[in-house]
């Protein structure tokens, strides 16, 4: 069990009806991730759904030769493991904590039970799944089309958007794995961003110095990604308001009858 107000810190849980959030809070427990921690390894079966609060998780697709690349970043705007509501078979996905912090977790069976019972959770999951599909399609296209420096700027901004700090704990080796390129290429690209005064990278820490310059250097995919996340949030909140209005209307009609 966790305090109800903890659910308000996750943007996927915050808009849900109060009664439903209370039921979820009663069956949730807090979890803490450390920087760089492998939260779920390739081939592991998913038995729980995790809602990040202050942690940020990188979802990486891993090939048989161990090559990996990031296809999604998840922070407080989303959840990890929702796919297990439909299929629990393990896949070639590794989840790594880009930034350590707190999260809430709930058993997969309990979440599936609430999913079947509550239309609000169904709406939430479907809206978020649609946003994820758009983000993954965009990442694929971006990786094929845009220069590494542009992609790196987009990645840095996307991580910082999910963190209150200007500092990201990241090594060149980790970034090369996430972006799917050689470490030498990361070193060269990061060096250019540092020379231009956008970031400072030292001893495993990257500090954002000039966000405006990063945004101007980033490819169009960064702004488009922000729009996708904002549309997801608006759709969920609008949908819940509509359902609440419909429920209230039905109640009043029943009283009049």
Image (cartoon, rainbow, N blue to C red):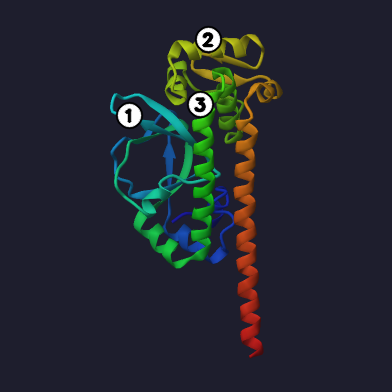
Q: Position of residue 219 (x, y in %)?
A: 62, 26
Q: Which residue is mark 3?
A: 143
**Disc 2 to disc 3: CB gap under 8 Å:** no
Q: Going from the N terminus, do you reach mark 1 or mark 2 first?
A: 1
Q: Position of residue 252 (x, y in %)?
A: 66, 82
**Disc 1 to disc 3: CB gap under 8 Å:** no
Secondary structure, mark 3, is helix
Question: Closer to the camera, 186 or 167?
Answer: 186
Q: Which residue is mark 2?
A: 188
Give the number of the mark in front: 2 or 3: 3
Tell me if mark 3 has few (under 14), some (14-19) or many (20+) residues whose alpha carbon lies within 10 angstroms of its own.
some
**Quadrant including the N terminus:** bottom left
Q: Does residue 42 lie above or below 177 as drawn?
A: below
Q: Position of residue 191 (x, y in %)?
A: 56, 10
The answer to whether residue 53 is visible is no
Q: Does residue 25 lie above or below 246 as drawn?
A: above
Q: Residue at x 53, y 66 (%)?
A: 19
User: Seen in the image, is 154 located left or right of residue 180?
Assistant: right
Q: Which residue is mark 1?
A: 63
Kindly indicate the quadrant of the structure image that contains residue 110: bottom left
Distance in Å between CA atoms under marks 1 and 2: 26 Å
Question: Closer to the camera, 151 or 156?
Answer: 151
């Amino acid at each position: 069990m966790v305090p109800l107000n903890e659910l308000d810190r996750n943007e996927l849980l915050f808009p849900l009806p109060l009664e439903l959030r209370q039921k979820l809070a009663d069956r949730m427990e807090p979890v803490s991730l450390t920087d760089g921690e492998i939260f779920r390894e390739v081939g592991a079966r998913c038995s729980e759904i995790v809602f990040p609060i202050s942690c940020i998780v990188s979802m990486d697709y891993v090939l048989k030769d161990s090559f990996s690349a990031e296809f999604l970043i998840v922070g407080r705007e989303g959840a990890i493991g929702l796919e297990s509501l439909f299929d629990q078979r393990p896949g070639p996905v590794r989840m790594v904590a880009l930034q350590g912090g707190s999260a809430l977790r709930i058993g997969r069976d309990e979440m599936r039970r609430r999913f079947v019972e509550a239309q609000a959770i169904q709406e939430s999951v479907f809206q978020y799944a649609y946003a994820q599909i758009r983000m993954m399609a965009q990442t694929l296209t971006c990786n094929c089309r845009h220069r590494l420096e542009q992609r790196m700027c987009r990645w840095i901004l996307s991580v910082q958007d999910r963190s209150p700090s200007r500092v990201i704990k990241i090594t060149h080796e980790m970034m090369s794995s996430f972006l799917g390129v050689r470490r030498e290429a990361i070193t060269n690209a990061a060096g250019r961003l540092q020379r231009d005064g956008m970031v400072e990278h030292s001893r495993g820490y990257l500090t954002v110095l000039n966000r405006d310059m990063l945004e101007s250097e980033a490819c169009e995919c960064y702004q488009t990604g922000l729009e996708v996340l904002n549309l997801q949030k608006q759709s969920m909140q609008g949908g819940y308001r509509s359902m609440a209005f419909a429920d209230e209307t039905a109640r009043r009609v029943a009283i009049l009858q």
